[in-house]
Amino acid sequence: MKVNSEGISSSRVYLPARQNHACLLDFFIANFPHIDQAEWEARFAEGLVMTADGVPVQANNTYVPNTHLLYFRRLAREPEIPFEESILFQDEHILVADKPHFLPVTPSGLYLHQTLLNRLKKKTGIQELSPIHRIDRDTAGLVIFSVNLKERAQYQNLFRDRVVKKVYEAIAPYSEELINKLPMTYQSRIEESEHFLQMQEVEGEANADTLIELLETSKPWAKYRLTPGSGKKHQLRCHLYSLGIPIQNDQIYPILTPYQEYDLDFSKPLQLLAKEIYFKDPVTGQERCFTSQRVLG
């Protein structure tokens, strides 16, 4: 893997002997049919396709089987996110970042440079940096990264084994009926709906649980403390919506609004914050506790 000056990581592709192409461009067109020929021509022209040693190659270069090439993505246009992340903690094992709303954690779709991962790679110079968990682009707060590639799996296993305690804060409607029941642990079964962006509650054995506590009220809103016991997609958003108090400025629940590609509205961030995280470090044995410095509202 190679990383360019912007912190963007390359992809690696193998040129098999069983294939025979007149030139490198033909190979990429044949093996990546979802990418237009013009796009590959532009990548070659801009030096975004190269040997394993980082030497740019040309589209009309001879196809050499049993070798590897590196290539970078290219975006003609990308949404600009005008909010800065901060680094709360960093040692030789982990880095803890405090992410702003709207910023994706990793590259996908329209986002390549404007991601937390690539910003941190560029800022720290650590090319092996890798997130060991994710939060939604719409959600602000704590994200932990592994610094050492050899240790990454140990940290990822903490989340797989559910031995990490995560605490969120959310602003949602004040509900007299619900407030009288708090604190409470809400349980339900969450599965994917017909639309890939939305989850839904269905009948059956619960697979998701959330401890809900009241922090403060400012009618018609209230601030809640949410501690998920499971890690289902959109669990917190789905649970509060099901309880009749959808999170303020949620663009997915209850109504899925049209996706904004470039002209983003930054005036109404989702009022959900990954506030605290606790775990025992599998490498050092230390008890780790981190708190976001961001505030909702």
Image: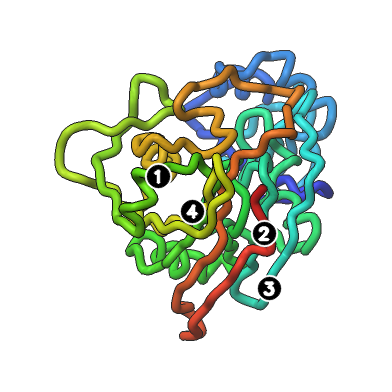
Residue positioned 66% across, 77% down in the render: 91
Which tag is nearer the camera, tag 3 or tag 4?
Answer: 4
As drawn, the residue found furthest toward the left would be 204
Residue 1 is situated, as x and y percent measured from the top left of the image, at 65, 51
Q: Is residue 270 above or below residue 63?
A: below
Few, some or many residues within 10 Å of mark 1 (<14, 14–19, 20+): few
Residue at the spot of label 3: 90
Which tag is nearer the camera, tag 1 or tag 3?
Answer: 1
Residue 209 is situated, as x and y percent measured from the top left of the image, at 30, 52
Residue at the spot of label 4: 224
Residue positioned 66% across, 14% down in the render: 36
Which tag is nearer the camera, tag 2 or tag 4?
Answer: 4
Residue at the spot of label 2: 98
Q: Nearer the viewer, residue 281 or 210?
A: 210
Can the viewer see residue 43?
no
Residue at the spot of label 1: 176
Which tag is nearer the camera, tag 2 or tag 3?
Answer: 2
**Mark 4–mark 1 contact, CB under 8 Å?**
no
Q: Nearer the viewer, residue 255 or 113?
A: 255
Q: CA distance from mark 4 to mark 1?
A: 13 Å
Q: What amino acid does circle 3 point to?
A: Gln
Residue positioned 34% across, 52% down in the render: 180
Q: CA distance from mark 2 to mark 1?
A: 33 Å
